Amino acid sequence: MASRMDPLSLEVVELIGTVVGRYYEEYERAAAEHSLTGAQARVLGLLSLEPMPMRRIAQKLKCEPSNITGIVDRLEARGLVERRPDPADRRVKLAAPTPDGLTTATHLRDSLNFAREPLAELSADERRVLRDLLQRMLGS
Amino acid sequence: MASRMDPLSLEVVELIGTVVGRYYEEYERAAAEHSLTGAQARVLGLLSLEPMPMRRIAQKLKCEPSNITGIVDRLEARGLVERRPDPADRRVKLAAPTPDGLTTATHLRDSLNFAREPLAELSADERRVLRDLLQRMLGS
DNA sequence: TCGAGTTACTTGACAATCTCAAATATCCGG
DNA sequence: CCGGATATTTGAGATTGTCAAGTAACTCGA
């Protein structure tokens, strides 16, 4: 039971909750700056790294494939994403960012200020320690 | 620009993104275990700390008050929350958890395993360091 | 090569979340 | 008491999400 967690761990969980809240806020704000919803921004950000089948987007975002259809529809309607046939499998549609979409994704990343100012508070050594602790916490 | 962020900071931001993803997943899972949506669980969790006016819930959750109306409606329909008049201001409705809601909120907290196992990887000293770094990162 | 079973995507129905604008009731200051 | 501000609700509409069903295309064994 969480109530049996030691006070120190509870404190850390609480802090992580706060970090999560701030991160989400910031992400939505950055998306809205480009007239995108959070979900649209997440899909576009994913595709800007690498075009992929609809199904894989759903797996990455842990939702039903039918949900992705609508989100990609809206991104496509705005000319940020396009559906390409997969030469290897005609059932598959590869979603890929348009040049415009790629630009938007870059701007989006750039306007995601989260942790830029916050991290400035920490020295390089401290950031290294933080990185290592988070890595171990997340496991391998 | 984020692209001018040093590689170390980028790495940390990336890790925090992963933490945020895992936390959200875990939160939704815990809520679903009690047949609640994430939004409903957040409102119930908030009210379990202290009853408050609808408006204040909206401020805490950074959304429109009219949105809260619906969420509290659903919690009320399930007997987890009730609306009480504010003796000091008849415009205000105080949302408060029922005994049942309070129980659910406690179970919800208990079933939120996030960071319980992950933190077990870290020694007490390391957790203290992590706490301090997060605190400084969040400011104040 | 045929056909059964699987896989990828879409569609349609429906619920929840969210915003915005408008309506209602109440408060407060002059 | 009146005019302006505040708290909540209502209704319209967009988006996100689920589930079930449908279509097209792949795969593999007989």
Image: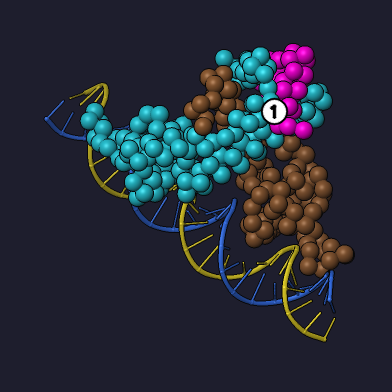
Chain colours: A cyan, B brown, C blue, D yellow
In the rendered view, would you say A122 is above or below D24? above
The front one of A16 and A91 is: A16
Instruction: Assign a secondary structure to mark 1.
Output: helix
Is residue A48 at all visible to an observer of this figure? Answer: yes
Across and down, in percent, residue D11 comes to: 56, 70
Q: Amino acid at mark 1?
A: Met
Q: Residues within 10 Å of mark 1 (few under 14, many from 20)?
A: some
Across and down, in percent, residue B76 comes to: 72, 57
Identify the residue at image location x=33%, y=38%: A99
Name the residue at the right extreme. Answer: B87
Chain part drawn in magenta = B113-140
The front one of A140 and D19 is: A140
Main SS of the magenta part reads: helix
The front one of B80 and B90 is: B90
Q: Is residue B97 left or right of residue A20?
A: right
Identify the residue at image location x=82%, y=25%: A7
Quarter occupied by the C terminus of chain A:
top right
Q: Chain of mark 1?
A: B
Q: Quarter of the image holding residue A138?
A: top right
Identify the residue at image location x=57%, y=18%: B8
The residue that mark 1 highlights is B137
